[in-house]
Amino acid sequence: MNVSVIEIIDMQGNFIKRQNTTKSKNKLDVSDLSCGVYLLRMQTDKDFIIKKLVKH
């Protein structure tokens, strides 16, 4: 599975962060995010994967 875009969305539906990825750069720095619950949306070659992200 090849992830091409990673997005962070808050629980109100606002896009917080978006990053295009490559095989050598597939990490997203979340140190600037406030504590809380977010959605992590990853776009692959075929579809989207959505996961819950909890930052403490």
Image (spheres, rainbow, N blue to C red):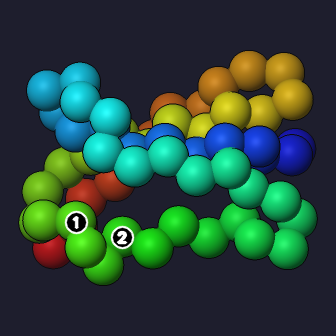
**Quadrant in which the C terminus appears:** bottom left
Specify the amino acid type for callout 2.
Val
Residue type at tag 1? Leu
The answer to whether residue 52 of the structure is visible from this angle is: no
In the displayed structure, 14 sits above or below 23; it is above
Q: Residue 33 carries which label?
A: 1
The local crowd at label 1, few if under 14, some if 14 to 19, many if 20 or more residues have their Cα within 10 Å, is: few
Q: What residue is disc 2 on?
A: 30
**Where is 42 relative to 53, above or below?**
above
Q: Quadrant of residue 11?
A: top left
Callout 2 crowding tier (Cα within 10 Å): few <14, some 14–19, many ≥20? few
Identity of the residue drawn at 75% across and 71% down: 25
Q: Distance between the residues labelled 1 and 2?
A: 5 Å
* Lateral position of residue 13 relative to residue 5, left or right: left
Q: Whole-percent x and y of residue 49?
A: 61, 32
Marking on residue 49: none
Disc 1 is placed on an element classified as loop
For residue 3, side relative to residue 11 (left or right)? right
Residue at 74%, 56% in the rendered image: 21
User: Contact, CB < 8 Å: mark 1 with mark 2?
Assistant: yes
**Residue 45 spot, x, y in % from top left:** 87, 29
Reply above or below: 19 against 9. Answer: below
Residue name at image x 58 percent, y 52 percent: 19
Q: Is mark 2 on a helix, strand or loop?
A: loop
